[in-house]
Image (tube, helix red, strand yellow):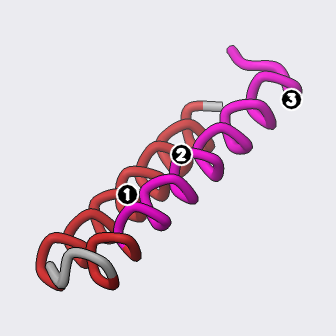
Amino acid sequence: MLTTFEYLFFVLFTIFAFTKALSYGIYEIKQENNKIGGIFVILVGLFASIISNVALFFNK
């Protein structure tokens, strides 16, 4: 069972990780002209953040 502090820490960490994935995806699109790779990185980061937070919320 997670405490509120642990849950809040996990949510903040996933937001931080998603912003890193988002910034790398934008870098791939803008600098490397790799639209498919950039979009894929952003979508995987988004889905991983959402699924992990939802799973933790329902487990709480």
Q: Position of residue 8 (x, y in %)?
A: 80, 37
Query: Number of labelled discs?
Result: 3
Instruction: Find disc 1 in the rendering and name its residue.
Output: 45
Point out which mark residue 4 bears: 3
Relative vertical location of residue 51 with respect to residue 56 in this rendering, above or below: below
Instruction: Using a 10 Å C-alpha cutoff, classify the residue at mark 1 as few (fewer than 14 neighbours), some (14 to 19) or many (20 or more).
Output: many
- Nearer the observer: mark 3 or 1; the answer is 1
> Which mark sits nearer the N-terminus, 2 or 3?
3
User: Is most of the magenta stretch helix, strand or loop?
Assistant: helix
Kindly check if marks 1 and 2 are in contact, taking CB atoms under 8 A apart as contact: yes
- The residues tagged by marks 3 and 1 sit, at their Cα atoms, a distance apart of 24 Å
Position of 56 with respect to 2 (left or right) is: left
Q: Which residue is mark 2?
A: 17
Measure how far apart labels 1 and 2 are at the Cα level. Answer: 8 Å
In magenta segment, residue 8: yes
Label 3 is placed on what type of residue? Thr
Looking at numbered disc 2 in the image, what kind of residue is underneath it? Ala
Quarter of the picture holding the C terminus = top right
Front residue of this view, candidates 35 and 57: 35
Give the magenta part as a residue range. 1-25
- Which residue is the extreme one toward the top? 1
